[in-house]
Each structure stands twice: as C-alpha cells, then as structure tokens.
Amino acid sequence: MNGNEVDILIVEDNPHDAELTIRAMKKSRLANHVTHLADGADALDFLFGMGPYSNRDITNVPKLILLDLKMPKVSGLEVLQRIKSEPLTKMIPVVILTSSADDPDVRKSYELGANSYIIKPVEFNNFAKIIGELGMYWLVINKV
C-alpha cells in the first residue's frame, strides 16, 4: 500500500464488501490509489500518522472516504466524529457506505458531518453502478 497517494480510503471490516467495492471501482476505472483499512482504529492511525503509519505524510489526505458504520475497535460514527472535528481532515468528503438503514444511524451520521449516506445494495451490478456514480461525483464533478 502506498500511503503517499490516496484518492479513496475504504474503511470496511467485511473483506467481501471491501472486495466488491474495489471491484466496482475498477469496473468504473476509479480504482487508482485506493487504500482499504479493516477497522476504525486503523483508519484513525492512518489519517493522523500514528502507530504503523507514523512515517506517513498526513498532509496527503484522501479525496474521498467510504466509511462503514459497524466495525470492531472504533465504530464508523466515532471515526466520522474525529475526521470532522480535526482541521486537517474535516473537509474530506465522507460517504457512509453501510448495510444499516436504521434511522438513528442515518440521523447521527449527518449530525456528525457525513456528506452522504448510502445503503449497500445486495446485487453486484446495482452496487457497481452506485459506486461508479459515487466516485465520479466526488472525484470528478464535485469541487472542494
């Protein structure tokens, strides 16, 4: 993993869902410089240059973070809260990509500063289409 060039950071504890997301990005030609981390604690270490990422240039922030909510160690909501409370990372678009349709999760995500909340579709072609549109919007169309 090259920690110096990250366009998209995927924070997802389910390896199958992470692989589907990466495959969908490849299908849409958006998979350059994708980094996958399996839990919230690792994501925070990566973003803020701690632990195994202490040598990473933290000023090179991702252009987009795809964040799952239900993760071990540190939840997606805790990661989101930290990202949006730090000057270095608060402007990074964070898209919640989760299987949770629970209204409290949706509400809390937006209260903490999520830029979008997407429920993962079960069918791969639908999922690939959504990921492609998502990547195109946040990486090409949207300007920060």
Image: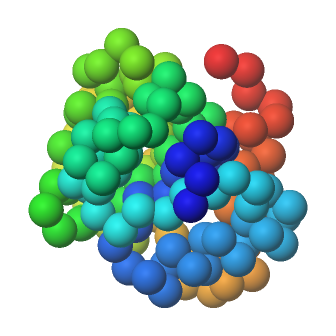
Q: Is residue 35 above or below residue 112?
A: below
For image coordinates 41% across by 62% down, the residue present is: 37
For image coordinates 73% across by 20% down, the residue present is: 143
Quarter of the picture containing the C terminus is top right
Q: Nearer the viewer, residue 68 or 105?
A: 68
Q: Is residue 91 above or below residue 64?
A: above
In the picture provided, is 101 more to the left or to the right than 138? left
Residue 115: x and y in percent read 49, 34
Quarter of the picture containing the N terminus is bottom right
Q: Nearer the viewer, residue 88 or 99?
A: 88
**Quarter assignment of residue 99:** bottom left
Task: For residue 17, say whether it is visible.
Answer: yes
Residue 69: x and y in percent read 29, 58
For image coordinates 69% across by 38% down, the residue present is: 138
Q: How is the image coloured?
A: rainbow
Residue 72: x and y in percent read 17, 68
**Quarter assignment of residue 19:** bottom right
Q: Which residue appears farthest toward the top when viewing the image?
A: 87
Q: Is residue 126 above or below residue 59?
A: below
Q: Which residue appears farthest toward the left when viewing the image?
A: 73
**Quarter assignment of residue 112:** top left
The mark total stands at 0
In the picture provided, is 101 more to the left or to the right than 15? left
For image coordinates 41% across by 25% down, the residue present is: 89
